[in-house]
Amino acid sequence: MFIYGVISFSIRMDRKHYIFSLKAKNSGAFEHGWNLAKNLALKGVDVSYYNHWWDSPISEVNLETGETRPLDCSKLSGKEGVFHLQTHTWQYDGLLERIITNKNQKLIYNLHAIIPYFYMGEKQKKDFLDGKLDYQRIKEGIEGKMSGREKAQLELFSKVDYLFAISKNHKKVLDLMGVRTPTYVFENLSDLSSADEETFLKASALSGAFREKIGAENVLLYCGRVEKSKGSFGLFDSFRKVRSEFPSSKLILLGTGEDRAKKLLSLGLGGDLIGDIEFVPWEDKNTVLGKINFLKYYLSADVLVQPVITDELYSKTVIDAMSVGIPAITCKSPYTIGSSASADDIFKSFVFMKENPCEVHRITKLAKDKVMKENTWDSYISRLSGILRGD
């Protein structure tokens, strides 16, 4: 309790916090912004939360009721405080230019993705991180693929006081790009770990009924939007391999409802897989029922499969899986199973998981211990407080 008091006092007395995020979407950036605001408020910090969607006007959101009202952006001009911006914050109507007029302001840019790196090919990413590619040499080709909105991210690097990256390798990318703004690594955080015992019990009961309903020996889970740009289409090829070796297998697509099935077919899903895929719409974890339903699908799964190429880059969905003791086939790391760099890698990782239960148990326990200690809102706010105090 003493630690919480120090955190709350130092932040509350020094600054008001303004959180700029997205409208409620199936998005890690939205969930980060919303939960940052809620957790700061719980510690007594003076917080205001604002949302938008790309080029739409900004609204102020009541953290208690979720009600919104249009924001007159001029009212924020020159305000003192700490402004938290997300990867996708769009500079609507010159908003940031009008805000950045007070020397006592602090601007933090939370980078859930680094757009130039996002557009590099798989080999380019590896060579770049290995120091074999100079950013200036490949800059023109990469930035030529970016929209004006995405290029705004590059412009913000030099306008803010701090950059928060979600992995050590993302920080390395910024260093190799020559970005000089102070950069800190803040990994994604778990929100499922905060669920109370009653929520877990209800979700566990529902998960048992769900598994009985689908009647599969092996249940794989993917959470999020299925898009080629996210590298998630290799998931289908890997599931096809898994199913050929382990016929009693099902795949849950959490965050991809049945209305997306036809679209996915046109993008290469393959009609042969439809019967073994459960399409589940996005669940809003900010409601009691939503969190129970979300947990239900996690607790129903034997493994989370979240394709990621960059080592030790943990998506929010992976952190959530770690927090509830679900093994994850994703980035290479001490806390995950194998690799997800290709469909064949995912298949081999799944086979390893099936054949080495003791080792998988060890890795899963190690991951849960790490997340419960390091990837919490208490640790995040403690570090944030230290940075703002100049520690």
Image (cartoon, grey):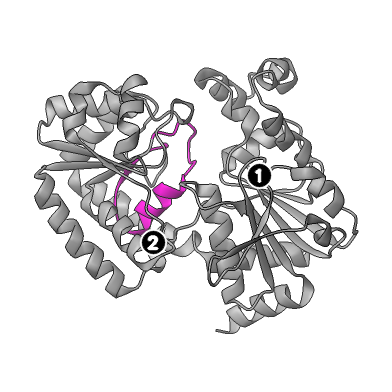
- Quadrant housing the N terminus: bottom right
Magenta residues? 307-331
Decide: is 143 above or below 230: above
Q: Is residue 338 visible?
A: no
Q: Residue at x 34, y 46 (%)?
A: 281
Residue 231 coordinates in the image, percent (x, y): 43, 28
Q: Nearer the viewer, residue 330 or 71?
A: 71
Decide: is 311 above or below 271: below
Q: Residue at x 53, y 62 (%)?
A: 35
Asked whether the residues under the numbered discs 2 and 1 touch, taking CB atoms below 8 Å apart as contact, a structural biologist would say no
Residue 233 coordinates in the image, percent (x, y): 37, 26
Quadrant hosting residue 47: bottom right
Quadrant hosting residue 34: bottom right
Nearer the camera: disc 2 or disc 1: 1
Along the horizontal axis of the image, is 294 left or right of 118? left
Asked if residue 269 lies in the magenta stretch, the reply is no
Q: Which mark is residue 186?
A: none
Along the horizontal axis of the image, is 214 left or right of 126? left
The residue under label 2 is 192
Q: Residue at x 50, y 48 (%)?
A: 28
Q: Is residue 144 visible?
A: yes
The residue under label 1 is 56
Q: Residue at x 71, y 20 (%)?
A: 139
